[in-house]
DNA sequence: GATGAATGAGTATTCATTCAT
DNA sequence: TATGAATGAATACTCATTCAT
């Protein structure tokens, strides 16, 4: 009850949208969850779409804040990649429902948000590009296309985590996420290392 | 006018959905495009959601048919991986709009479709697993976790193609898709090869 | 139940709008009154505004139909004026509520309708202009400005009838409408006659 | 900033309502125009409707003040009628937007206001009745029904001015308003004069 | 089987009004 | 007095779905 209203609404929206998806989340329920009047939502957000956009921005911002904090102080490129995967995975697990929904309903809110997410993705890719560039300059990695490799890294993480958060496919084998991270990292690094790791 | 009605409807739905997205595609317009009565849609599909589900299945089926045909006769695992990427890329480019929409609106049609897509993805992963397994058995690849690697391959492709079809991000560098495929393949193979390729 | 749906809706709308005015008349109530579904209204009219516009056109059309029918066959300009007043008065009395509301809420539906009513008013004025012109040519009336006089005639009728239908001001004096018509006609004709009538 | 708040609000309301009409004029904008807080409006007026009512009363009051001032000192009934038309016309032109809006949206504020306007109209009619009565007593006008004639006069003016302010129907002929006034007066007087004027 | 007229559930949004400060 | 943040009632409109023909 103490937090500022705008944030109260954002958090309530994340909760409701995570459960029902964008289209099924009614403004009324979001307001009820935030324990405020329906009209108040429109004092802080001009429309449902805008609320959704701000909610996505808010979450991604939190992700990058967490990421930067964790990366802070680490020097070794390989270690940086490991931290990145860890944060990424942890975030994805923690906000599973939200991630699902955002990915599922992103089309509903039109270009502007997509552009924003593109920016976020590019930011992520740029962070990775820099790490890889650093590794190359240190003579640790081969001379590879930084962007392509960055995207490969993102994709490799995503594709392995997605089924788990999307479909609770924990059945295949109960690998812990740490093991998964190591496996991916090992293969990935092998792909770009100057010397084979194994 | 010759094809059976069910397929006529599916094709009309793909067309309309590709242009407008799931929510904006009205049954009426789909029916009009298929040149049949609105009620007729409900003779073949029990609901809009089901129509959408069937439409996705239909498209994915076509993808696998194409894939199997292209893979037919090829023996070398590395060559198989290259063909896979080529077909995947070609399909994604050809059905850009459709892909966009399906990915954007997938949340709108609920679990069943997601389960089906999981199956498709797993099928893709299994195909890849087999290829990798074959490579390992031939002493070409290292002993790696087949599933993880399969998903890494899918993710590496997807993450590199997605921005191009989603955001027309052709600006960075006008790499041709063939070049892109080679780059990814090179790094990926390096990651799993017994000997470094370079 | 027999009439065509469009007319059923128009009549229901006239009824509801007459009682509540444009803004208070909800589509739901109109539909209920017409004993049809809410959605059906939108099959025949694209919006509430359009329904209102059509309703006004419909009524004015009926007025002119009635007017032309009554004027049919009459030659004497003075007699024509008398008939005009009679029809005008009769219509105003019969559709009192409707007239009130239409006049009251006309601003709510925007320019197009106003333009249409302008046309109607001008049609009425033109009819009168012709009658007066005829009288002038027959040497019965003085050479006066036809348009101005036509509008004076309309205004003289309206201003005398309005308070009666608007405020039930039948208290002042229980003049019958016929007496009123005669009085107005007498003074009006005196104003334009070549010879004084009295 | 000097005027008392109530009048500040009334003037702001006139301004906003003239531009947007009753329904589109929001309390917020009126308050902003008056340069006061939204809540303050409710200190002086119990509701939007009441504000509108008071606003109409205020304007009509101003009209009668102007009218009485102009009529002051004039003796000749005919001259009085001429002055009346002039003031009426001038007022209508000056407050065109306001007049339009008030007439258009009058239904929105319900019976009370209409009753008040009836009073105003009657007051106008009574003023005219007196003038006509005076003319009759002076042997200038015939023995006619004062009320009916008064309303005819009002209607004759109104019907001729209305199209000009409502539809900018200045096309027919660019008669100046003075000419119009003379024409109407001539015919009207002819209708009630003892001797023909021409 | 095929049709399309009829339906009504479902919801974002506005804005006059309130009331704690 | 004056304020403006908060409120929630009220409503037009869409479109998937039904069913009589």
Image: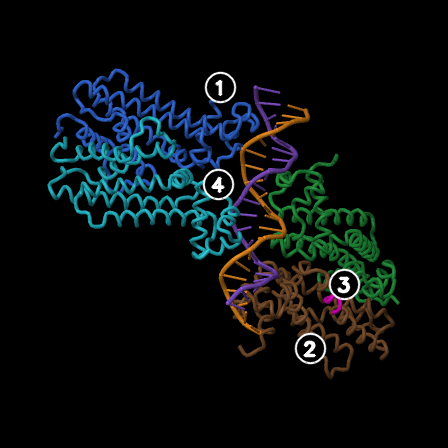
Chain colours: A cyan, B blue, C green, D brown, E purple, F orange
Choose mark 1 or mark 4, whichever is in front.
4
Q: Is residue B3 magenta?
A: no
Q: CA distance from mark 1 to mark 4?
A: 34 Å
Judging depth in this view, the residue of A142 and D154 nearest the camera is: A142
- Whether pointer 1 and pointer 4 mark residues with C-beta atoms closer than 8 Å, the reply is no
Residue linked to disc 4: A23
Instruction: Indicate the chain on which mark 2 is placed.
Output: D
Query: Same chain, marks 2 and 4?
Result: no
**Chain of the residue under label 4:** A
Q: Circle 2 — which element?
A: helix
Instruction: Report the mark closest to the observer, 2 or 3.
Output: 2
Stretch in magenta: D115-119
Tag 3 secondary structure? helix
| CA gap, disc 4 and disc 3 | 56 Å
Marks 1 & 3 on one chain: no
The answer to whether the residue labelled 4 contacts the one labelled 3, judged by CB atoms less than 8 Å apart, is no
Q: Which residue is mark 2?
A: D65
Q: Closer to us: mark 4 or mark 3? A: 4
- Residue C114: x, y in percent? 64, 55
For residue C159, the mark is: 3
Label 2: how many Cα within 10 Å (few below 14, some 14–19, many 20+): few
Q: Tell me which chain the residue with mark 1 is part of.
A: B
| Quadrant of the image occupied by residue C82 | bottom right
Element on which disc 1 rests: loop
Q: What label does residue B4 carry, if any?
A: 1
* In-image side of A151 versus D76 (left or right): left
The quadrant holding residue D75 is bottom right
């Amino acid at each position: 009850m103490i937090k500022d209203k705008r944030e109260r609404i954002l958090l309530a929206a994340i909760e409701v949208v995570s459960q029902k998806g964008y289209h099924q989340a009614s403004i009324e329920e979001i307001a009820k969850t935030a324990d405020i009047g329906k009209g108040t939502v429109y004092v802080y957000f001009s429309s449902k779409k805008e609320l959704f956009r701000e909610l996505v921005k808010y979450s991604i911002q939190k992700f990058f804040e967490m990421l930067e904090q964790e990366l802070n102080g680490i020097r070794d490129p390989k270690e940086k990649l490991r931290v990145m995967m860890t944060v990424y995975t942890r975030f994805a697990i923690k906000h599973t429902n939200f991630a699902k929904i955002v990915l599922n309903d992103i089309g509903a809110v039109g270009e502007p948000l997509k552009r924003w997410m593109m920016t976020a993705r590019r930011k992520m890719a740029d962070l990775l590009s820099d790490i890889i560039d650093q590794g190359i300059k240190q003579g640790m990695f081969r001379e590879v296309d930084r962007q392509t490799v960055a995207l490969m890294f993102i994709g490799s993480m995503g594709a392995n985590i997605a089924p788990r958060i999307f479909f609770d496919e924990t059945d295949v084998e109960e690998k812990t996420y740490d093991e998964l991270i190591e496996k991916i990292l090992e293969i990935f690094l092998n792909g770009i290392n100057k010397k084979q790791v194994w």
